[in-house]
Amino acid sequence: MKKIFCAFAFFVSLSIVATTAQDKSVLSYVNPNIGTAHSRWFFYTPAAVPFGMAKLAPSTDGSYGNKQGWEAVGYDSRHNTIEGFACLHEFQVGGFLIAGITGKLQTTPGLLEEPESGYRSRFDKHDEVASPGYYKVKLKDYNVTVELTATSRVGFQKYTFPKSDSAYIILDIGNKLGESGDVKDASVTYLGDGKIEGWVITYPEYVKKYQPGGEVRMYFSGVINKAPYALGTFLKNKQHHGDTTISGVGSGLFLQFKTSASESIEFKAGFSYTSVENARTNLMAEAKDLNFASAKERAEKKWTDELSKIKVTGTDETSKVKFYTGLFHALLGRGLASDVNGQFPQNDGSIGQIPLNKKGVPTFQFYNTDAIWGGNWNLTQLWALAWPEYYNDFVQTQLMVYKNSGWLGDGIANSKFVSGVGTNFTGLAIASAFQSGIKNYDVETAFQAALKNEVGYQARIEGAGKMDLKSFVEQRKIDYVPGWNTTEKGSGFSVSHILEYSYNSYAVAQLAKALGKKKEYEQLLKLSTVWEDYYDDDLDFIRPRVSDGKFLEPFDPLAPWIGFQEGNAYQYTFYVPHTPEKLIARMGEKKFINRLDSIFRVSEKTKFGGADINAFAGLTYVYNHGNQPNLHIAWLFNFTSQPWRTQKWVRTILNDFYGTEHIHGYGYGQDEDQGQLGAWYVMAAIGLFDVKGLVEMNPTFQFGSPLFDKIEISGNKRVTIQVEKQSAESTYLQSVHVNNKKITKNALPLSTLQNGARLKIVLGNTPNESLFQNKSK
């Protein structure tokens, strides 16, 4: 999970305008600059539309790349120089850095601390504007103002120059950028009449690990609205004046202009992951007659429409900023990888074709995605509730990869396998979609893909994750083997894998049951209980076992990485989301409640994830909201006789872990993870969450404490949640009515919401201990 503090007031002012609450646009509650200190490559892309391919943003250190492929890189609010403006931002995808300068021609970005060493420029935070679909900044060293916006597949850049005979636009095409990894080859050509086309082929670190020999291809076709009076190409520092085309690592193009004072030059480029021809097609389809101003207007309307699908009303303006900024990241998230004609990059390097309807329009869209590890406690629940069409496309995307490669991929970059943590939750995501009524795909293929993901160890490939699956399936065990590797012999993350595979098995078992596949159901259901063999009744902790079957000694429940992926025994012992009742019974309800409550009392002092600016800040703590394994545990009280503790601690996490500053945003420099932490905030603030991840045959949400006076969720049917006696002190549910019927069970079927529902919730400042007659099931 993800450098000057005094800039906070300015950042907030970017998106919170001084008007009355009734007059404020939903866009004014989104502050993209929140959490931008120490953030991932794909996090800060304000100039984009929901789920888009073109994601434009300033880059302060993207040219530095990152060593392992996951470290924070791209835009960091603690930096005070900008090297240029990158066009493509996805997990393991980064391409096309463009810059505008005046004066001496330079063709390398230069160093952060020495902007004169390249074409980068200093900038001031007060000259920066960021909002959904738009970005603007003044480059101080050149007196050039840059603006960015986008459609789904087209990026727009506007450069306003001073009077100059040496105004340049630099297209840096062939160098590493963000999470792109090393460049294998690149090319750029000026075709005349303002037309520019090019491509780059990269070898990201995660592709190197999970699909050796694979590559990520990116293409663009653009047009600039003023003819240059001179131009040339370059290979890093070596310039070739007058040349119009160049290929190779380090390739780039420069265009020179004579400009009058405040003259603007616009460049728009279509992007594609399949071909230059399709990039050109995307440009013509989306932006043939579109200029910057019109594109910006469309982008802002698109954001308004999507963000307004969930409308919150109340007097707490800070919580609205957190809410809509979180929703912004959830919708920005995992972006398009298919073209307007339905073509998309296949795993094997070929070009695939999405079926077209009678009007010649693709029947679904294909998307890139980081791993869905932990997404079952945030993104998929949000998609099921308000964006089911996107969820369906997500499943279709995964099935296209499966059909081409024979395996599901937990993370994909242009269909190449880039498994985030070496496991694979895609089968669970598919099962959850089906149980949520999202079924517009080949269900039998989906089931076979999910089943293979959970039990198919024969000839399994690294890109599908779960390389220790054989012993889990055949012997109901995974041995702890020191180190970072996972093989058939075991894993350094053995017991966290046991917990995850048990949960995944349960999810796909429910899918099998729903489809009447008794044999597969029984096999998977049996596998879902393997976690029980790793519970130490003497210590009441989940523990790793070694090859002789004994528990690992010595044992430190706070030690991360020893049997646990990105966590420790305190955190992972609660990782039995598919059957929390069994875990509670095993530990004893009194001890379970006391331990869990004490964990939150201790964690409150560290803001629930550590105050260090580090993606792994909370790994040695008893609770870490900044990473996936803990995102459900505050909701586990709902399965005990004291559900009001969920109401208390979830509200506290919303207030304390989440901030509105560039450092304190999603924890302190922790990893928001492509919409996961943002979506968690949204679901928690609504007051609905399912610990089981919507994998039951009739999935239900458990209740939390809504954060607003009124919440309206639009879709095929409207959901309205009316909250009475809302205040900072009113944390606890006093009563719940759904469609005028009093609710006495802590479970609300998703289907009730999908059919349209009116909820009335009354809050108070003390728990109503008799509110629910039954625990959640």
Image (cartoon, rainbow, N blue to C red):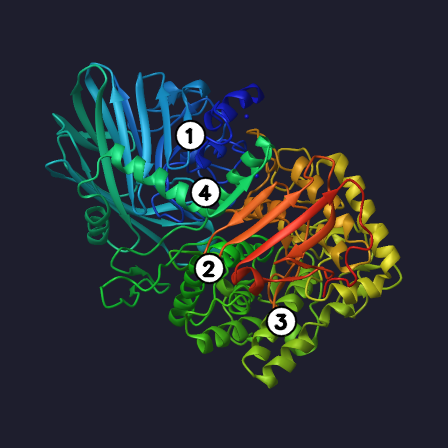
Image position of 47 (left or right of 293) = right
Pointer 2 local density, CA inside 10 Å: few below 14, some 14–19, many at least 20: many
> Relative to the observer, which residue lies in front, 517 or 307?
307
Front residue (pair 740, 500): 740
Q: Position of residue 122 (x, y in %)?
A: 40, 19
Residue 42 bears which disc, if any? 4
C-alpha distance separating marks 1 and 4? 15 Å
Q: CA distance from mark 1 to mark 2?
A: 29 Å
Location of mark 3 (residue): 505
Judging from the image, what secondary structure is the residue with disc 1 in? strand
Answer few, some or many: residues within 10 Å of disc 3's Cα (few below 14, many 20 plus, some between 14 and 19).
many
Disc 2 target residue:
388
Callout 2: SS: helix
Q: Nearer the viewer, mark 1 or mark 2?
A: 2
Q: Depth-wise, is mark 1 or mark 3 nearer the camera?
A: 1
Q: Tell me what residue is drawn at x 28 percent, y 36 percent.
A: 156
- The residue labelled by disc 1 is 130
Real-space CA distance between mark 2 and mark 4, rounded to the nearest whole angstrom: 23 Å
- Residue 527 vs residue 25: left or right? right
Task: Provide the secondary structure element on which disc 3 rests.
Answer: helix
Q: Point out residue 575 in the picture as x, y percentages from the top left corner.
A: 71, 59
Q: Nearer the viewer, mark 3 or mark 2?
A: 2
Q: Quadrant of residue 552?
A: bottom right
Q: Is residue 563 above or below residue 399?
A: above
Q: Name the kind of residue labelled 1 in the image.
A: Ala
Question: What distance separates the C-alpha of mark 3 from that of mark 2?
Answer: 24 Å
* Mark 3 / mark 2, whichever is N-terminal: 2
